[in-house]
Amino acid sequence: MDEEGYGMLGRMEVALGEIEGCREFAALIPEVRTNLVYAREQAGTREDVLAVDGRITVVEGLPRAAGRVKFGASSHMARLIIELRRVDPFMRAGINFAWTPHLSAWLGRYCREKGWVFSVIDRHGEPEEIREAEGASIPWKVAEAVRAAEGRVPKVFYETGAIGKEPVSVLVGRDPVEVAGQACEIARNYHGDR
Amino acid sequence: MDEEGYGMLGRMEVALGEIEGCREFAALIPEVRTNLVYAREQAGTREDVLAVDGRITVVEGLPRAAGRVKFGASSHMARLIIELRRVDPFMRAGINFAWTPHLSAWLGRYCREKGWVFSVIDRHGEPEEIREAEGASIPWKVAEAVRAAEGRVPKVFYETGAIGKEPVSVLVGRDPVEVAGQACEIARNYHGDR
Amino acid sequence: MDEEGYGMLGRMEVALGEIEGCREFAALIPEVRTNLVYAREQAGTREDVLAVDGRITVVEGLPRAAGRVKFGASSHMARLIIELRRVDPFMRAGINFAWTPHLSAWLGRYCREKGWVFSVIDRHGEPEEIREAEGASIPWKVAEAVRAAEGRVPKVFYETGAIGKEPVSVLVGRDPVEVAGQACEIARNYHGDR
Amino acid sequence: MDEEGYGMLGRMEVALGEIEGCREFAALIPEVRTNLVYAREQAGTREDVLAVDGRITVVEGLPRAAGRVKFGASSHMARLIIELRRVDPFMRAGINFAWTPHLSAWLGRYCREKGWVFSVIDRHGEPEEIREAEGASIPWKVAEAVRAAEGRVPKVFYETGAIGKEPVSVLVGRDPVEVAGQACEIARNYHGDR
């Protein structure tokens, strides 16, 4: 393990500690469970991305990382952040959480207040040849999220549901401590507003 | 806790031990994660059904129960088994796992060899008024699984995917030790046949 | 697994749930950690005794079972309860916890109020030939605990420290649910009295 | 959390991963369980020392960290490493493990081969006024380990047992990755030599 890796692992631990302590975030964990990812500065493949082995689930009403933080432990979220880094190299961390129409409307307003770019990946628009080509889906998704935000890199976005696919929200940022803090703040504020 | 509850908890522990030791079953854990449920003889609500708090995820390549076994820890699978018990009171335990077209075709053949009823819940056929009525979906699903099996209670069935919903396979039986053993046997055989 | 085993496992789970929820018991977990054991009605060897794999430690200020409940997972506590069962066949469960002079004096008074037999195993009295004979120590200890209680089987007793050996308190009873409940009551009362 | 803390946490995670994968080390975990500690460069109190919350126990035959890595999670080992750092500021990490006469004799030879200083803290020599003065014991122990090694800072040492105290071995080093690697190498070599 190199110096960058040690510092990254440490940040993931602190970020997970924050998430595991946030009861309100448990309500935002989707059926497919949450993952938190963190890409190396020069990440090229999913092996360069830290994630939680077994994802983050809900135990005793609190978020709980199922296994250890490891390089290569995520596929979808890892590839999403790698692709996003091509557009904005500062975006190295991300977390996914639930989506509902109600949360989405609330998130739109929240992001406006924060001055954050909010976007959407409408999977209905995904061309069939891309959906079926191995590995082509993620680049299309990131391009779509940027396109829907008029060329800006979004801070928060969601993927609409599709046949067999749960809709999810995603928040990205520079490092997992920032991302976890913002996700927990969203969870607490959304909980308070309901 | 009463005598029935103690015996049920014990059976769940033994069943989980079997699942956690079956590396091949890890490959069959769906995005929404697996749960194993076990209903009291007179189960009426989800509080009468044991399940794994946080579901069963994959850690270090092996199935891993995220939290403890508890009454009330499952919603969807718990209500499914309660509804199924109305049709066949001996069916008190169930487990869900992944669905793919390939696995499904294989499962059909496997069930035929075993003499097990194999069925399907085609969510496309779900009437809109049922999909939207709180709590009406599960009774419809069970009725559909029985109808599609020509009136017989299926041993294995699957729910097709829908917008926002992952397709999943389900295996049911009398108790979790039986169900876990059969699910692991499926996983090992399917792995061996690929 | 047989019916007796299932029911025993279930009782251990319920008992552990009680202990894991008792913050005050965390203060009574000794350096060597706590174990909770439960012997089969006809227990002959440690393989007939359920215990917590990895013992019960303290995480985030709460008692936490490190691993699963298993037959054969304890050595010392398992053999102690097997030996005790020879004297009183109803004594099938036991838990160990910390010992200090202050706790011990308090426990003496507590047991008197409860009408419980309180005893001591003074390891200084252990004959050298017994200490060195493989497996002879536990029968001597149980005989000593009974002798020091004037022939009665104690409900609570402690082993004094010795060279290399931490002193510990032990509470025994019919089943782990009873034993866990009594141990937690002791922990809460002792905490309240300090 | 600061940069030093992140890097330290990351190193602890990597070190724990190594220990948790070393089956032979499980045989060296003492009754009081193992802890792995890592002190900040300027550590003054136990709050400046990372350790495993709940210590490292044995589950399914493998070492298992019971809880998360945290500052302040250790008392004895943390104060030992703080004190040792006063003598040699490069010694910032340590791990404790079992002691037996056989292991000790083996370790003496092993250290000689490695060119490591091996020492002993003979608790029989501890003056009574020190044993009883709060906080005085640890400085005495470190001074004694250095004294017994003729003024050199030991790489490996052990504390003899005392009334109520288990004897333990300790290995120290610059960081937890080094220390974990060396402890696992000891465990594997000792296992191989038996």
Image (cartoon, coloured by chain):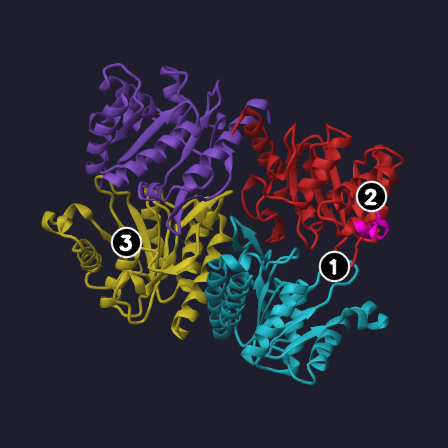
Chain colours: A cyan, B red, C purple, D yellow
Image mark for residue B164? 1
| Nearer to us: label 1 or label 2 | 1
- For this orientation, the residue located farthest to the right is B150
**Magenta stretch: includes residue A55:** no
Type of amino acid under label 3? His
In the picture of the structure, the residue carrying the numbered disc 3 is D76
Categorize mark 2 by other alpha carbons within 10 Å: few (<14), some (14-19), many (20+). some
Q: Residue at the spot x=28%, y=43% of the render?
A: D166
| Nearer to us: label 3 or label 1 | 1
**Which contiguous range is marked in magenta?**
B120-129
Q: Is residue D126 visible?
A: no
Instruction: Give the total number of marks visible in the rendering.
Output: 3
Q: CA distance from mark 2 to mark 3?
A: 57 Å
> Label 3: chain?
D
Measured as percent of width and height from the top left, residue C73 is found at: 47, 35
Categorize mark 1 by other alpha carbons within 10 Å: few (<14), some (14-19), many (20+). some
Categorize mark 3 by other alpha carbons within 10 Å: few (<14), some (14-19), many (20+). few
Measured as percent of width and height from the top left, residue D175 is found at: 38, 66
Q: Nearer the viewer, residue D149 or C95?
A: C95
* Callout 3 secondary element: helix
* Callout 1 secondary element: loop
Measured as percent of width and height from the top left, residue C173 is found at: 38, 24
Side (left or right) of B100 relative to B55: right
